[in-house]
Amino acid sequence: MFKVKITVMKIVHHQDLIDKYENPISHTCDMKLGDTFISENGQKPKNFCGSAWHNVSPFVEQLANGGGNFYDGWMKNPKSAMIACNDGFRPVSFLLETIE
């Protein structure tokens, strides 16, 4: 099984949508630009957001098992994927890369 490196590539903040639709919350995402995590055996890395893991885990699992080439050549590196969490107010984009 391969390790998969997960890197925070972009964090977007839609203040207009937050102001219009979100109830005030005291704690939001802890991710920082450039944060990296290593998934071993397709498992969620320590301190990785559970909600974001729900979105990235199917891709991590496939990469960890030697898969890739998602959507017939979507990524320049077939052993990678660019996946975002499902937070419509503060989406975070993650680069997933197989570590050989």
Image (tube, grey):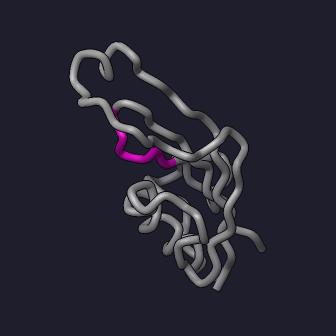
Relative to residue 81, is residue 59 depicted above or below?
below
Give the residue at the far right of this rendering. 100
Is-magenta flag for residue 39?
no
Main secondary structure found in the magenta portion: loop
Which quarter of the figure has residue 5? bottom right
Residue found farthest to the front: 26
**Magenta part of the protein: which range?**
83-88
Based on the displayed image, in which of its 4 quarters is residue 10 positioned? top right
User: Which residue occupies 41% across, 21% down?
Assistant: 14
On the image, the x and y values in percent for residue 70 come to 48, 57
Image quarter for residue 90? top left
Residue 31 falls left or right of residue 21: right
Identity of the residue drawn at 59% across and 71% down: 45
Which sits in the foreground, 50 or 24?
Answer: 24
85 in the magenta segment: yes
Residue 42, position as x, y percentages in the image: 54, 78
In the displayed structure, does residue 37 sit left or right of residue 52? right
Between 96 and 73, the one lying in front of the other is 96
What is the tally of numbered marks visible in this picture?
0
Front residue of this view, candidates 29 and 11: 29
Residue at the image position 21 percent from the left and 23 percent from the top: 21
Residue 18 percent coordinates (x, y): 32, 22
Q: Residue at x 43, y 53 (%)?
A: 71
Q: Quadrant of the C terminus?
A: bottom right
Q: Position of residue 77 (x, y in %)?
A: 67, 53
Q: Quadrant of the N terminus?
A: bottom right
Q: Is residue 93 left or right of residue 34?
A: left
